[in-house]
Amino acid sequence: MRTTTARTFNAMEAPVRELASEARLNLRHLPDYMDSIADRLQSFEAETSTDGQRIDFRFTFGDASFDMERLVMRANATDRDGLARVKDLLATAVEVYAKAENPEIVWTGDLSGETSLAQFREMTVTEVRHLTPHMRRVRLAGANLHRFAKFGGMHIRMLFPTKHVPDPLWPVLGANGLPVWPADDRKPVARVYTIRALDVAKGIIDVDFLVHPGESVGAAWAMQAAPGMKIGIMGPVGRPVRQAEWYVMGADETGLPALARMLETLPAQTRGLAFVEIADQREKQQIDNATGIELHWLTRNGVPAGGDRLLAETVRSVTWPRGASTFGWFAAEAAAAKVVREHWRSTLGLGRDETLAAAYWRRGAAGLMAG
Ligand SMILES: Cc1cc2nc3c(=O)[nH]c(=O)nc-3n(C[C@H](O)[C@H](O)[C@H](O)COP(=O)(O)OP(=O)(O)OC[C@H]3O[C@@H](n4cnc5c(N)ncnc54)[C@H](O)[C@@H]3O)c2cc1C
């Protein structure tokens, strides 16, 4: 078990977590998966410690532990949202890394009979407008949106009706702590989008949709979205972006909503460089940049989206300062994200906790989901 990258904590400092749940893990090779499971959990800002055969993870919203002797995982939290979140993170990590053993997870303890999915909300469209010729802002209203401001994730999985499933059923919570989906003839189609703006008190979320060419679900829905229409959202999803004194950022139009939200919400003293690739000057948006990060717009000028190397090359050419705490953030087409990720991780030798270069879409592939 590797814990070198983990921050450790003192169990005496831990707050009392009243809600508790546990699940048995009938996995013969659990130790083989633990490094990957721990790595994934740590990327959600978990502090880690090991005590004999027990590995503990402490998140801001709850605690988790793996008892390697009894083959049991536990989740604790002070509230329902926190417990649901810890259970979801643990069950997802086990499902992903122990896939070969087809794990069967059944949680017992608090909220084990619960069937409503903590991360799901049905939302209603209240307003739609064009920000630029190809960017459409959709305002959604819904109840009890507090959790979308928690956990550090900026994104949501949006559940769309389609022409084949015009009236979808929404998912419910399974005994394993993960969503259970309806049969295919009632199943909505999911795509990932960013919460561009959130007003919990007013119960409002804004999502900016790029209207891109080709047969699509998300972009097609946004084009005909109108007040009164219903849509499902799940989240928040995504890892928190580490706080730093200096950032280098890069995004195409799909990463622009997240980049813009960061420029509007990071502390005023933050410094760095941000590059945004857009089709042409007409796609430039007004962003209320509250930071000292310099924003530069790069235009494709006729080159199709995903076919231009300028964004990746520009981000790659940036010299990182020494001394300051730094972070690299990049969100664009898969090939560009790969170029930047390889440069940051392999050439510059930067760690996973200092960089995030994500594929937000892939040329020619529908429905790419972030990990
Ligand atoms: C974490 C995350 C956050 C995201 N946030 C946003 C957001 O806030 N706003 C936003 O608009 N997108 C965002 N995206 C990107 C969005 O999820 C993808 O573009 C997705 O493919 C759109 O779904 P669709 O149904 O419109 O197209 P799909 O059905 O997935 O794809 C249909 C076709 O369109 C192509 N295509 C997809 N995206 C583009 C594009 N950008 N340009 C040209 N062709 C494209 C595909 O290659 C495919 O050939 C985000 C993605 C991730 C992973």
Image (spheres, rainbow, N blue to C red):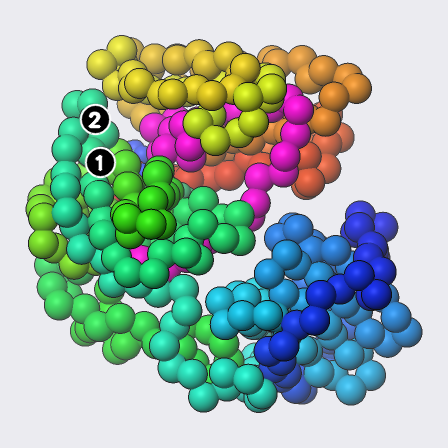
> Amino acid under label 1?
Arg
Q: Position of residue 364 (x, y in %)?
A: 32, 40
Residue positioned 55% across, 35% down in the render: 357
Does residue 42 appear anywhere in the picture? yes
Q: In the picture provided, is 106 more to the left or to the right than 68?
A: left
Task: Look at the image and say whether residue 133 sits in the magenta stretch.
Answer: no
Q: Position of residue 108 (x, y in %)?
A: 57, 88
Q: Is residue 235 above or below residue 299?
A: below
Residue positioned 16% across, 29% down in the render: 130
Q: Which of the four quarters of the rendered structure image does ligand 1 lie in? A: top left
The residue sitting at the front extreme is 201
Residue positioned 68% across, 34% down in the render: 354
Q: Which residue is mark 2?
A: 131
Q: Which residues are magenta?
A: 233-261
Secondary structure of the residue carrying tag 1 is: strand
Name the mark on residue 137: 1
Q: Position of residue 238 (x, y in %)?
A: 50, 49
Q: Is residue 133 above or below residue 213?
A: above
Residue 103 lies in quadrant: bottom right
Q: Is residue 28 above or below residue 214?
A: below
Residue positioned 64% across, 22% down in the render: 246
Instruction: Measure how far apart labels 1 and 2 are at the Cα level.
Output: 6 Å
